[in-house]
Image (cartoon, helix red, strand yellow):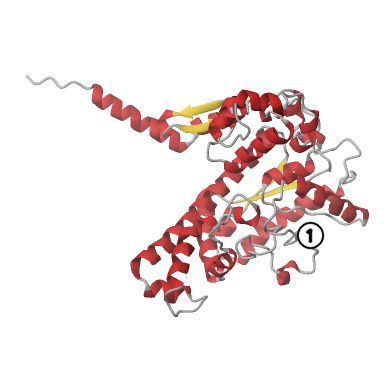
Amino acid sequence: MQVYRGLDVLTNKVPVPERNGVPHHLLGCIDPSVGFTSRDFRDLAIPIIDDVLSREGLPVVVGGTNYYIQALVSPFLVDDLVEDVAACSLDELRENCGVDEIASFERLKEVDPVAANRIHPNDLRKIKRYLDLYESLGVLPSNLFQGENAEKWGRSDNFRYNCCFVWVDVSLPILDRYVEQRVDSMLDSRLLNEVCGIYNQNTDYTKGLYQAIGVREFEMFFKSYFSIKESTEVQWPYFSEIVDTNGVRLKNMLAEAIEKLKSNTRKLVHRQKRRLNQLKSIFGWNFHYVDATEAFTCNSGDLWQTTVVEPSVKIVRNFLEEPISLTNDKKLGHFQRKNPVSRDLWTQYICEACGNQVLRGAHEWEQHKQGRRHRRRLFGLKRRFDTTQQVRIVP
């Protein structure tokens, strides 16, 4: 989201004074109304990285969205493979579907049940991407991630560059608390003004900057806000006066929107952590892990320096001192060839104990079974079952 122009507070762009003279690329350079895929990111980032390397500089990729990092360093990308995949033609798909327009998850299940089994019914962006693939080239998405194609994607022994991954992490309870504080801080920095500035009653929340977490969450609040604003003399941007003037309903809507923003941000953080663990365990990525939990729990500036900055600097320094070029022309020291881990990314598992939660792939299923929440649910179900099976004999 940081590549788009606008919403600097919401997308947490680095303010110019904090950049300390270090050139930052691809910040706020894309029109907010257009789509921007991982392929677009890769195609824009590679020339910049190559230019930095040609001047003997050090390119630092900061993220963020793990899938985009994966698209950048891996020479294999779905979009590049589409035209080479042997799949049924568009005419055959339409004949099988019986209609010209494939417009729903149910239709996707009819045409490509394997792909439909892999994604969530509410994942509108991915469903739309798959349907666009059908309509343009007639390619089944499930063909792209199976067999030989799956072995190419994201493999650590086949990177485009010699990479050093530094993962600065914090324990989940502390991260969740930090998310709450960050959202409150963004609100203090006039987040509502930003979002209100791009609000449109007919917004398509599946495109461009409007997909950012923190936009759709305020839709109902702004809808009511503007209807009230038209009938009052209070001028924009005095949200507090309008909210105070119009009683409990608008206050509650604002509180619900803020809580939804915090909840969705926490979910994103959890997904990103799971994705990083998958890149490590499934794809063999070599992460240098730096635990910043202590620095976040104490207010000492020295702790951040000693527990985060100094270990990270040491990791990067050791990496740079290795006699290996940053471009991947030679066999990489960090990423020796490994046999790929056998992985099942397509099988769908349903956990009845956790309210029919859908898990995708054996790895995600195994992780879920080991989770505290799942074990607690099983324990509760077992206790209830044992209680119902007891028979009291009254003399």
Which residue is denoted by mark 1 in the rendering? 25
Q: Is residue 76 left or right of residue 175?
A: right
- Compared with residue 80, is residue 28 higher up or lower down, i.e. above or below? below
- Residue nearest the viewer, comparing 37 with 302: 37
Where residue 316 appears, as percent x and y from the top left, is 78, 51
- Residue nearest the viewer, comparing 252 with 49: 252
Secondary element at image label 1:
loop
Where residue 38 appears, as percent x and y from the top left, is 73, 45
- Report the residue at 90% width, 44% height from top: 323
Q: Is residue 381 left or right of residue 167?
A: left
Q: Dividing the picture into quarters, in which one does residue 259 lie? A: bottom left
Where residue 282 appears, as percent x and y from the top left, is 67, 32
Where residue 142 appears, as percent x and y from the top left, is 66, 27
- Report the residue at 66% width, 33% height from top: 281
Please identify the quadrant where the C terminus is shown. top left
Quick one: label 1, few (<14), some, or many (20+) residues within 10 Å?
A: few
Q: In this view, does 169 lie to the left or right of 78?
A: left
The reply to whether residue 349 is in sight is yes
- Report the residue at 78% width, 54% height from top: 60
Please identify the quadrant where the N terminus is shown. bottom right
